[in-house]
Amino acid sequence: MRTDPGSTPTHCPYCALQCGMRLATAPDAADGSGITVVERPDFPVNRGALCGKGRTAPAVLSDRVRLTTPLIRTHATGALEPATWEEALDAVADGLARVRTGHGPDAVGVFGGGGLTNEKAYALGKFARIVLGTSQIDYNGRFCMSSAAAAHQRAFGLDRGLPFPLADLPRTGCVILVGSNLAETMPPALRYLTELKENGGTLIVVDPRRTRTAEQADLHLAPRPGTDLALALGLLHLVVAEGRTDEEFIAARTTGWAETRAAAMAHWPELVERVTGVPVPRLREAVRLFCTPESAMVLTARGPEQQSKGTDTVGAWINLCLATGRAGRPLSGYGCLTGQGNGQGGREHGQKADQLPGYRKLTDPAARAHVAEVWGVDPQTLPGPGRSAYELLDALGTATGPRALLLMGSNPVVSAPHAAHVEERLRSLDFLAVADVVLSETAALADVVLPVTQWAEETGTTTNLEGRVLLRRRALTPPPGVRSDLEVLNALAARLDPEPGGGLEKKFPTDPAEVFAELGRASAGGPADYAGIDYGRIEREDGVFWPCPAPDHPGTPRLFLDRFATEDGRARFVPVAHRDAAELPDAAYPLLLTTGRVVAQYQSGAQTRRVAELNRAAPGPFVELHPRLAERIGAVEGRPLAVVSRRGRAVAPARITDAIRADTVFMPFHWPGEGRANSLTNPALDPVSRMPEFKVCAVRVEPVEEAG
């Protein structure tokens, strides 16, 4: 591999901060990548700061750990064996075509990822709908912030993770951070909270664990997992009871307050204390801290969102902001901390089961007509909405579900809820093709594996958690034997063309700049309008905030200051009421499990588990539990514990700490095998967002006899 002359400005391949960095030649790099990371202090989001994952990101570029040749499973041995690209592409096209011919278009599914660039996400959605003709497409971003997205749409008429730049955080008066451990999930962003406190602002953290982030808080609220909705309703009750509502804002800029107020008043403080375990005095203190300054924000993350009532939970926090006039004003508002690197852009341009590019609804005739015209097809040929992510995975190999699957940039064997069941469904397929940079646990099950380029080997855009569209620049020549996802889709389109030589592949250009220009035309006039953005402008301006409908439009760093994106311009209160998690503790499963991340690993760990430095920092899974619980069950620090739910069993060493509730255990979800946390998690779905309930399920915990 080689770098272009000098260093190349680009962005980290991991979380949705999309931290700026530079890549430079390093022939003696110990990790074998041939490059090194250089800080980029001029980029405004991270201002040079990088976490360990960002600093070590080049390690996965090394030929030592990544795929460099296609693989095909042979009938003779049942093993994956090296193949040529022509053989592999022919096998994928034959497998998809055979199933589609025998069982219909919806017998072929597509599953994407929140790490794909905007160009690849756009092309994948287009490929599913006009080449395969299938409605069965969704992506792992459904597991990220779909509940917040649904709540945004209901309340504001538009979904963008943060409706303001991160730079606004230190200048507000109070931040309530719900279910986020920024110190471990987005370490460079922690400085914004530090600066908030240095400026005299206050920080409230809501988390059942006393995390490194919670230790920075002025007030830490530790509710039982699954009770964030009751907590938000209790705070709103106190806001009303103490006369802290902003009646002028409510009257001028919202609708639906009377019903929402009545719903909140049914959640009196003593009831909320019983449900959540948070004492009433701490509820009152949270209201005082939030309502006293002129401005304040609520930020949510996976904690309240990954629940079977996640949409209503986020909606309750939005209601708190609206009732206090903390939305649609400078330095105030509700925002969601998107997790995956392109979790925002990945859902805007067609990977989701119900959406078309530009965040258009697949059921909207006008949207279908617009996108079909850009694609040069008849709108009537576009399939309707399909299954959501877990429902798609759950249906694989069944009589009514997909029998073949094309998967790009995801590892559901580790990341999906009820993971053992999902693994079983993947094994049941007639045909599975996976395009990835490493041989993930999911790729290892495939009939064909296609080795594709990585972040530093290709140009493309991502959209970070602020709605800032960014450009990742190609800095390296990929190794021989590796192709881009765009090249894969182009080659498959040619092979699957119903008219041999008909030129279908021309609808799938391999130049990312050409794809992005088409994406801009397809998104024009839609909620997520990129029409005024091009690569040159992104480079000049350190990213452009959407919506940006024209080249002379300044972009939109701050949404909703004048009006909300609803038909009448008013935000909508949505009345909600607390309800229990889908699964509660009982005699057989007396504890609650919650899951999350650690600083040195990322998502399913498919890439970070291949980096020696990160593995030294976080070598494997663990079970975090309170000393009282440890004493009761006879757990010993570092000794193996079995965590058992109604769906499976996981084994990992005990980590005993008083930083967690005594009725709760915690496991990180980055590892496969016997320590796979998602063997335990509950696939109960939110009725609106179809988000699974990752964050709470009933379990029992018991020591494991060690051999010898």
Image (spheres, helix red, strand yellow):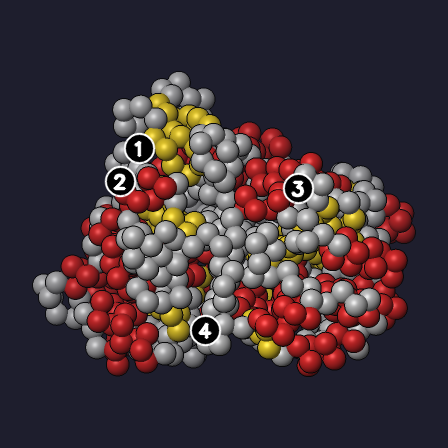
Label of residue 196 in the image: 3
User: Can you name the residue that lies furthest to the left here?
Assistant: 501
In the rendered structure, which amino acid carries the disc numbered 1?
Answer: Leu
| Residue under the image location 61 percent in, 55 percent down | 332
Q: Based on the displayed image, in which of its 4 quarters is residue 30 positioned?
A: top left
440 shown above or below 688: above
Q: Based on the displayed image, in which of its 4 quarters is residue 519 positioned?
A: bottom left
The C terminus sits in image quarter: top right
Disc 4 is placed on an element classified as loop
Residue nearest the viewer, comparing 697 with 344? 344
Decide: marks 3, 4 in contact (CB < 8 A)? no
User: Can you name the residue that lies furthest to the top here?
Assistant: 28
Task: Bin the neighbour count of mark 3 within 10 Å (Cα to Cα): few under 14, some 14-19, many 20 and up.
Answer: many
Residue nearest the viewer, comparing 700 with 188? 188
Query: For the residues carrying marks 2 and 3, which lies nearer the camera in this image?
Result: 3
In the rendered structure, which amino acid carries the disc numbered 3?
Answer: Leu
Instruction: Answer with mark 3 or mark 1, whichever residue precedes in sequence.
Output: 3
> Distance of mark 1 from mark 2, alpha carbons?
14 Å
Label of residue 476 in the image: 1
Decide: marks 1, 4 in contact (CB < 8 A)? no
Instruction: Answer with mark 3 or mark 4, whichever residue precedes in sequence.
Output: 3
**Residue annotated with mark 2:** 481
